Image (cartoon, grey):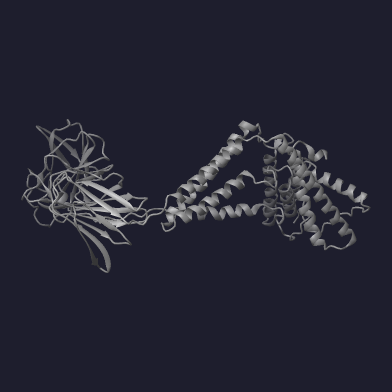
Amino acid sequence: MRSSRLASTANSKTSTNPLSPTPQTSDQLRPWQFFTLGALICATVAVFIIRGTSAENLIFVCLGIFAAALVGLASLNALRPLVTGETREPEMVGGHTRAAIEREKNMVLRSIKELEFDRAMGKVAEGDYEEMAGRLRSRAVRLLDQLDKSGSGYREIIERELASRLVKAGTAPAAQDFSPGSCPSCATLNDADARFCKSCGSNLLALVLACLLPFSFFLLCLATPAFAQLQMPDPKQMSGIPRAVTDLPTGHVSVRLIRGQLSNNILGHPVEMHAGGKVLTVKTDENGRAEFSGVSTGTSVKAVAVVDGERLESQDFPWPGDGGIRVMLVATLKGGAAPPPVFQPVAGNVVLGEQTRIIIDPGDGSLQIYYILDIQNSARAPVNPPSALFMDMPTGAQTATILGGAPQAIVRGDRVTVTGPFAPGQTEVQVAYRMPFDTGEVAIQQTLPLPVPGLAVLMKQIGGLSIASPQLPNVQERDFEGERYILAQGPPIPAGGVLTLNISGLPHKSAVPRRLALALAALMIGGGCWAAMRRPSSGANAGRAKQLGSKREKLLADLVRLEQQKRAGSIDMARYSDRRTALMGQLERVYRDLDAQGGQGAAA
């Protein structure tokens, strides 16, 4: 159809317009090419440096390197106008920007397509169709003429120069023939139903980007970490035990009321807070929680609730002055056994039992260390020590976490705090942290807050690993489930004693490649800033103009020989058309670069 041919012609012409806002073409390395090449090199080096780690680490490191390249390129684009005086202004055509005219042209062509579709569906009368189609086609022709007349005239200059050289060579220029379906702008042969020229069309870039965006989203989804699910203890064992938390406002106490299981919240039930001679009553909300505030810091309080005749009481605890406290009261499930007797906590001390042990898992660049603290209470009633149990992690420890055990154990920074009271028998606390290393030896010094009758350190034997400790002189190797482990044991350690572990023979990588990758990334950013600050010298401009002039003469000579071959009939027409299109495109770019060097293109 006529409108399809019109749309194909319009896209072909506008895509090869010499004044389209494209970067200057030259033989030199352009900024975006420099930063892309640098990012690819740095990403390749980084992949080799950190190989053996997880795919998430590789993805984020590569993304970070490409982000550094983008920062360098952005610095170049931002600083260059400040030091060189170059400005980028939109190209104007008849008082309007070329982009605005292009948008209007695309809208008109789309309207012609829609009008033809409505006519084929019988929605538009023949008379109305002819009238509207005529107006739209006239408007499209005017827009195309306006875009064509706004050209720089490079092609006309080249054609005149070619004709002059052919006359001097004694060869008259032959008229250029275009077969049906050829591109009027670049003379490339296309299919009859082609919407875009296969030589100068640019929609393939949009297709590539559309394919890359979902792939990037998929890579980011792969980097999402997985979290392990922890098994929750019996709620009855946690009933009435206050737990210090940091997710509540300062001076707030939250009491949760449930029946038997964590999923059975008791809603709208009154809960009392006994604070000295004062009683505060709050009903539970939709989550089964009742929140209290406004009590003086340090006041001894107790939470009380009566559910179906069963009296639920918490342990006495001081009102918090820093952070908040959560308490859970668990009623007996209907039809279940009678609630166990509640013993009031007494003053006393606890110790670390013989099941206290340290497990070390060597990894790539770090040690994963686990503390299993066996806190023993030999009394028959809950014991409330004079102060909370504080345990500071060793220097250099990272990401300390409570894995399980006592619900009153919390981590704040590098300090683990376990508050009382402690139930009779064993209370286990599991702590984990990561100790990075970049050499073959690591020294760990851990202060023990409680006396330990016997401590065991277990580490998997890999390569030439070894453990040395003055507190654990008995070091031996044992086989367990087909693997080799190092077991270190020693005599009792008193409270406040410092356990020293010297681990040697760790597999490590040199830090030189990592520093080299960081240096390359910094070099890319610095290169962008330097290129933006550098002013081109007059000698460089003159040399560039001379180089472009030589290239122009060579391309014009090639074009003259091509026309002579066509007139002599010694070249195939398809090859002639492709070769002529390529030479004309190169000459247009050379003329444009010459104009950018000082107005020498059109003048020549």
In the displayed structure, would residue 139 be above or below residue 188?
above
* Picture residue at 26% right of the left edge, 40% below the top: 246
Horizontal side of residue 402 vs 451, given as left or right: right
- Which quadrant does the N terminus fall into? bottom right
Q: Position of residue 297 (x, y in %)?
A: 17, 31
Q: Position of residue 37 (x, y in %)?
A: 58, 50
Is residue 281 or residue 17 the one in the foreground?
A: 17
When asked about the image quadrant of residue 598, the answer is: top right
Q: Position of residue 267 (x, y in %)?
A: 21, 45
Horizontal side of residue 9 vs 372, given as left or right: right
Q: Position of residue 581 (x, y in %)?
A: 78, 54
Is residue 326 or residue 492 the one in the foreground?
A: 492
When asked about the image quadrant of residue 199, the answer is: bottom right
Horizontal side of residue 461 vs 159, given as left or right: left
Horizontal side of residue 138 vs 168, given as left or right: left
Which residue, as the protein is rendered here, is positioned at the far bottom?
482
Is residue 323 or residue 481 the one in the foreground?
A: 481
In the displayed structure, would residue 213 be above or below residue 88?
below
* Picture residue at 81% right of the left edge, 50% below the top: 554
Which residue, as the protein is rendered here, is positioned at the far right?
170
Which residue, as the protein is rendered here, is positioned at the far left?
380
Is residue 218 visible to the viewer in this orientation of the structure?
no
- Which quadrant does the C terminus fall into? top right
Question: Total number of numbered labels?
Answer: 0
Is residue 403 visible to the viewer in this orientation of the structure?
yes
In the displayed structure, would residue 288 be above or below residue 181?
above
* Picture residue at 59% right of the left edge, 37% below the top: 530
